[in-house]
Image: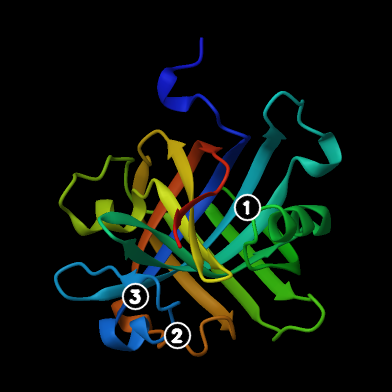
């Protein structure tokens, strides 16, 4: 039986072999990149930007079965962390995906900045080899190639620590026509692992003050995620 906590979701997804790659940036500088309606969120005075590659499986809308040819895609997003009033959430600068119908649904239904990309993922034991080349027409092209793997046993981040702050977010924000909308997200706690990563090619992080020597990386094997419709929360 579905718990009351998860009533009303409209989409269910399983995210696999996910990497969080984060680096710190100046909060005032980051604020200049955000819609003015949103406020940059910080941890000990620092703002953070992340690049997140993963595989998405078992995608389905509520009440409908997963469609075999459309239930799996690869995704690579660039994200940061924001506040609207007393609510903390994720803000996406871009989301590249390997499946054009999925891109169209995300752009037209959820109004998120998704872009079509040619993507591949290969796995050799623990190591994931992930590459992406944006092919979406009319936008700046970007390529990214990274290899990563877990280096520790799984653990749950503790509230109050940086790894919890970077990963455990239950909503995302978009600003459309000067209105702030939030989309709620729910999943079990991330089963995190320490990770190592080797970025082999990167034109995706240009403009985001990427600091290779200050990156923090976390790996997560799998989590099932529930998404709710966007709702207007401001103007």
Residue at (75%, 69%) from the top-left corner? 117
Q: Residue 123's mark?
A: 1
Label 1, label 2: how many angstroms apart (C-alpha)? 28 Å
**Residue mark closest to the camera, 1 vs 2:** 2
Chain-order first, disc 3 or disc 2 = 3
Q: Is residue 95 left or right of residue 116?
A: left
Q: Counting other residues with Cα less than 10 Å from the Cα at mark 1, is it few (<14), some (14-19), or many (20 or more)?
A: few
Instruction: Please state the horizontal and vertical placement of residue 212, each as a whole percent of the image.
Output: 38, 82
Is 153 displayed left or right of 70 in the figure?
A: left
- The label shown at residue 23 is 3
Crowding near pointer 2: few (<14 within 10 Å), some, many (20+)? some
Which residue is painted at 35% across and 66% down in the image?
82
Work out which quarter of the rendered image holds the C terminus and state it: bottom left
Residue 28 versus residue 194 in the image, above or below: below
148 vs 68: above or below: below
Q: Is residue 95 left or right of residue 64?
A: left
SS of the residue at dot 2? Answer: loop
x, y percentage for residue 136? 79, 75
């Amino acid at each position: 039986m579905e718990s009351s906590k998860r009533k009303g979701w409209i989409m269910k997804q399983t995210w696999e072999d996910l990497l969080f790659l984060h680096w710190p940036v100046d909060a005032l500088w980051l604020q200049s990149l955000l819609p003015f309606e949103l406020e940059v969120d910080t941890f000990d005075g620092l703002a953070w930007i992340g690049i997140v590659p993963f595989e998405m499986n078992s995608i389905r809308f509520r009440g409908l079965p997963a469609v075999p040819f459309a239930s799996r895609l690869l995704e690579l997003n660039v994200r940061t962390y924001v506040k609207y009033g007393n609510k903390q959430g994720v803000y996406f600068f871009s989301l590249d995906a390997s499946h054009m119908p999925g891109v169209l649904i995300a752009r037209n239904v959820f109004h998120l900045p998704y872009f079509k990309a040619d993507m591949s993922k290969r796995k050799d034991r623990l190591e994931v080899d992930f590459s992406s080349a944006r092919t979406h027409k009319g936008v700046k092209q970007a390529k990214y190639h990274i290899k990563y793997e877990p280096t520790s046993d799984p653990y749950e981040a503790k509230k109050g620590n940086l790894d919890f702050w970077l990963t455990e977010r239950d909503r995302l924000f978009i600003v459309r026509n000067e209105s702030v909308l939030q989309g709620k997200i729910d999943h079990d706690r991330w089963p995190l692992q320490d990770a190592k990563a080797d970025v082999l090619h990167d034109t995706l992080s240009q403009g985001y003050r990427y600091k290779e020597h200050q990156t923090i990386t976390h790996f997560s094997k799998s989590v099932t995620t529930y998404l709710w419709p966007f709702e207007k929360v401001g103007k």
